[in-house]
């Protein structure tokens, strides 16, 4: 399959959903479903990097996911550490730039240090920009941006009427990156679950029924093909 470069999305966002149901189907503990999900993630990142996607945002852990059973949260946190330890060399070698979306300060120390080190190490890379949303919620992101802007106004360096879209966007976790073009959520669920609410304003949405651990290159290609066939109007008319 080859899709013309100009028909590829610049920014793809993925809500990796269905690890729990996959584990249930296979009669194994949920932690093993998440582990299998990490394998799917590896191949998707490699593929996105190979075909020249500019930005890939993946939802790994939401601000609401802290409400899951303690044992599952611990398993997810352990997997995060493992992922960074095992993948960082290859990602760096492939020129991938890693950025964390979400509030890092609420992560456990080891995880916070690992993700910060990965961001620091890859910050000058010029290939795929890989956004990993960890302790991320769009409402939290928007509130943090609002607070930062309010502080600027309070200190007198900014007038309220100077808060333009580009000024506002500079305070988002995705500052400097294009809006999401294509949002994929696996497992058939059709909701955003607090992911990139601002950046998804004009995203094309794709809801394949496959559970995340089974998502592979073929499913990714299908989503990209569906995207290439969409008629994007942004409120205007394509005549
Ligand atoms: C998504 O899979 C992974 C995370 C939220 C970390 P789920 O664990 O939500 O899978 P389901 O929805 O229970 O099947
Ligand atoms: C969204 O999935 C979060 C991640 C994939 C990390 P959830 O499974 O947590 O979302 P809901 O609860 O079904 O909306
Ligand atoms: Mg889920």
Image: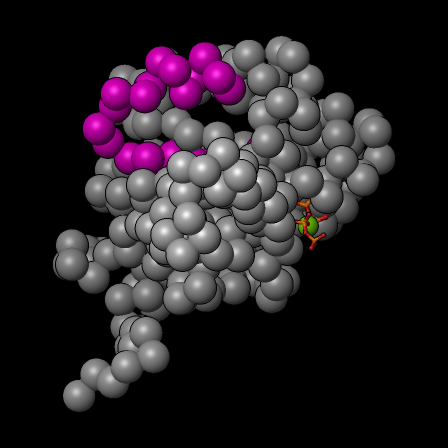
Above or below, comparing residue 233 to residue 206 in the picture: below
Return the residue nearer the eye: 177 or 164: 164
Q: Is residue 82 left or right of residue 2?
A: right
Quadrant of the rendered image containing residue 235: bottom left
Image x and y of residue 194, in percent? 61, 53
Residue at the bottom extreme, as displayed: 239
Quadrant of the rendered image containing residue 193: bottom right
Ligand 1 in which quarter: top right
Residue appearing at x 51%, y 51% in the figure: 196
Quadrant where the N terminus sits is bottom left
Residue appearing at x 22%, y 28% in the figure: 126
Residue at the front extreme, as displayed: 156
- Write down the region rendered in magenta: 115-134
Return the residue nearer the eye: 28 or 212: 212
Image x and y of residue 127, in percent? 24, 31
Image x and y of residue 220, in percent? 38, 53
Q: Is residue 223 left or right of residue 77?
A: left
Quadrant where the C terminus sits is bottom left
Image x and y of residue 11, in percent? 33, 50
């Amino acid at each position: 399959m080859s899709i013309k470069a100009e028909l590829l999305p610049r920014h793809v966002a993925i809500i990796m959903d269905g690890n729990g149901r996959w584990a249930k189907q296979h009669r194994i503990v949920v932690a093993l479903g998440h582990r299998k999900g990490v394998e799917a993630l590896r191949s998707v990142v490699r593929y996105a990097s190979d075909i020249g996607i500019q930005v890939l945002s993946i939802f790994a852990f939401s601000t609401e996911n802290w409400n899951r059973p303690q044992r599952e949260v611990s398993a997810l946190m352990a997997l995060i550490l493992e992922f960074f330890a095992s993948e960082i060399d290859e990602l760096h070698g492939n020129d991938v730039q890693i950025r964390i979306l979400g509030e890092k300060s609420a992560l456990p120390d080891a995880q916070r240090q690992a993700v910060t080190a990965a961001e620091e190490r890859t910050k000058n890379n010029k290939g795929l920009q890989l956004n990993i949303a960890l302790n991320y919620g769009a409402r939290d992101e928007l509130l943090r941006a609002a607070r930062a802007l309010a502080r600027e106004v309070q200190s007198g360096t900014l007038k309220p009427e100077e808060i333009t879209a580009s000024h506002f966007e500079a305070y988002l976790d995705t500052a400097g990156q294009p809006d999401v073009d294509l949002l994929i959520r696996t497992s058939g669920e059709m909701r955003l679950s607090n992911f990139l609410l601002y950046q998804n304003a004009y995203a094309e949405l794709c809801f394949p029924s496959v559970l995340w651990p089974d998502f592979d290159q073929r499913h990714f290609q299908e989503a990209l093909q569906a995207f290439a066939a969409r008629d994007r109007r942004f409120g205007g008319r394509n005549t």
